[in-house]
Structure formats: C-alpha cells, structure tokens
Image: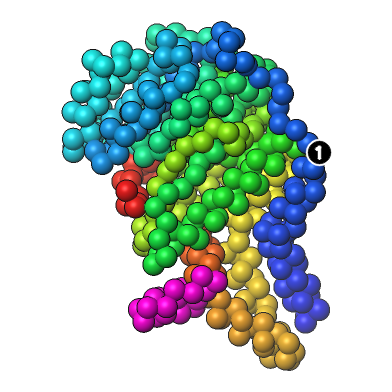
Amino acid sequence: MELVLQILFWLCVLLMLHSYVLFPLLLQLLVRNRKDNAIVFERTDKLPHVFILMSAYNEQKVIREKLDSVFDTDYPLDRLSFYIGSDNSFDETNSIIEEYLGKFPQIRFYPYSDRNGKSGVLNKLFEEINKSGYQPDDVFILTGANVLFTRSCIFEMVKHFKNKDIGQVAANVLNKGQRNDGISIQETSYIQRENLIKYREGVIWGAMQGAFGACYAMRAACFSPIPPNFLMEDFYISMSILSQGKKAISEFRSVCYEDVSNDVTEEFKRKTRISTGNFQNLGVYWTRLFRFDAVAFCFYSHKIIRWKGPFIIILMLVSSAILAVHIPFYLLVLALMVLFLISPLIDRLCKAIGLNIGLLRLVAYFNLMNWALLYGFYKYMMGVQTSAWSPTKRNI
C-alpha cells in the first residue's frame, strides 16, 4: 500500500513538473533555429478586408480611447469594418459610440436591449456580417473594449494570412497598471510567460493553445458559431481552427495594451469564470486528446494538466498525509503542502503590516489559480445558465 501511495505521489509531482517546467523547457529547446512564418503580405499588396468584432458592456471609462486606437492605424481604412455590439449597456457607452458614427463610416453599431454575454454578442455580429457578405479569406479580429491597439497592430496580425495554412494569429498583449500592493505584478509575469509558451507552440508546430481573447485575428472561413452560454469563446475558437487542420500562431510585433487586475477578489472572480469556461471546452474537445499529434501533445501538456491541477494537489496532499504516519520524509512534505495551502492567508497578514514579499505572493497567486479552477469546476458541474458577466475592475 505504501509503495502504491508513493508511486501516486511522485506521479502527481511529475505531472505538475511536466506542465509548468519540463514542457516550457522542451519548447525552449525545440524553438532554436525555427523561424516565423515567412509567407506574408507586404504593405504594397492588396490586403484582405478586416472585420473587427467587439462586445461592449458598460465601458464608458475606456471606449473613447479604444475607438481612437483602432482608427489610428496604418492599415487601409477602406479595407476595415468595425462591428460593435453593446450588450445592454446602461452607462454612457452607447452615446459615446454614437458620437463616432459620423466620423468613422467603418463603424456598424448594434445596441442590444437584452444581455447576451460576449459569446452571444459575437454570434449576433457574425450574423450581421454574414448578411452583408464577406470573402473566405477576409479576416476577423476579435478584441475587448479595454484593449488599446498600436498603429501596426492590425497589419502585423493580418499579414500572416497570405499563408493559406494559417487560420489564427494572436496579438502580443502587454499589460499596464502594475502595482506592488496587489497581484498585478504576478498576473503580468504569468501572462508574459503564457505569451512566450504560446508563441513557441506556434513557431514549432502551428499549435498555439488558445489566443488571449483580448485581441486575435482569424481567417473568416474558419469562424463557426459559439455554443450558447460559453464563457471562454477564445479557446473554443482556437481549438475549432486547429481541429479544421489550420495553424494557429502568435505575432510578437502585433502589440496592444491591456490594463491588469490588482485586486485579489476581482481576479479570483475572473479566474473562476475562465476556469468554468475551460471545463466547458474540455467537455467539447476532450476527444482531441486521442489524435496523438502535436495539437494533442500541447493540449495535454499546456492545458489539461493545469486544469486538473487542484485534483492533482489534493491527491498529493492525501497520499503524503497517509505516508507521513510511517515515513518521516512525507511528514516534511505534508508540512510544506499545508504552508502552500495557507500561503494566501500568510500573504494577507504580511500585507496588513506593510510587507509585500514577491515570492510569497507568487506562491499565493499560484494557489489562487488552483482554488479558482476547483470552484470553476464546481460551477461547471452545476451548469452554466448565461455567458453574461461584468467587466473586471482593473487599474484603468
């Protein structure tokens, strides 16, 4: 029995090490001497028509800056259409957008009178684009209201679609608004590391595991309606594109900026919603794991193990607790795991007396992600009734 428990414990350790350490190191080795996609549009070419799709809900604080950043672009405006759906906003969002309609005829505005959630709004906007007509090789860009484009952001994504094998290109989302008194620095570090992992997955295999919903482009022919009440439509779309045999990559030169959450409570809510959506996606794409290809390997290594992280940690905790009765080494392991589990509490106590310990907050942040995954799994099992949600309070 002890031998079985030890094997179980170290297998769990190996799984976590593989996802968080070994897999990123493998990508770092394999990416050497690999080059980005070289089949790209030049600025002098006839470029594809771009349809930007955006859902907005009570975004009066950022919507002006967002609209200004989209149209302050080096992409030809006559090749650009901007479809905006307001998800029953009740602040000044609608009136601000209406101010821009006369200035930019590229805007198509749809103020919906009921809540549809982001995925529902995107589906409605696609229906509107479908009515007016589009070409299969046109490009859709999906973006959030608080994400600010740089001048070359659109072109740097779109240029890759000259390569017929490419179905999706993710922008390089950089964060602003970091502060030492919360978790924004840890969140930024996590996002930067994720960006690098996804970039390498794309360069090596064209198998980037999920574009950030903040900003990404896709070939119009690859779009398929998002299932009702889906919370993580960005990952659903990414896996749909990969399942169609197209490649998904990231472009570091396509820069945009997004503010980052600093409040633990707000970030826990956001990660819970993301986690619930992750399990929705697993319910749709679990069969993708049995194809034994690069996409399945990345899916398992980068996503599945992490999504199952709380259950792996519980197995480690239970097995070490039983083993600690007879083997002193596992008593030490158990003590370390208990310290890990209460790290958010220790961090809060330190913060209350004015101590901001970066390493401790990083451990607490990792703990936060796994608690959110566990709660997200519970919410998934209870059933998701709507994809409508309020924007996270960020450092705007």
Residue 255: % across, % down = 51, 36
- In percent of width and height, residue 389 lies at 33, 45
Residue denoted by label 1: 33
Q: Residue 151 versus residue 244: which sits nearer the camera? A: 151
Colouring mode (rainbow / by chain / secondary structure / one colour)? rainbow
Residue at coordinates 66% horizontally, 24% vertically from top-left?
166
Query: How packed is label 1: few (under 14 Cα within 10 Å), some, or many (20 or more)?
Result: few
Q: Position of residue 212 (x, y in %)?
A: 52, 40
In the rendered structure, the answer to whether residue 382 lies left or right of residue 8 reads: left
User: In the image, what residue type sits under mark 1?
Assistant: Asn
- Total labels: the figure holds 1
Span shown in magenta: 342-360
Drawn side of residue 333 relative to residue 137, left or right: right
Q: Is residue 60 magenta?
A: no
Q: On screen, 338 above or below 148?
A: below
* Residue lying at 58% horizontally and 55% vertically, measured from the top left: 307
* Main SS of residues in magenta: helix
Which image quadrant is residue 37 in? top right
Residue at x 47% of width, y 59% of height: 185
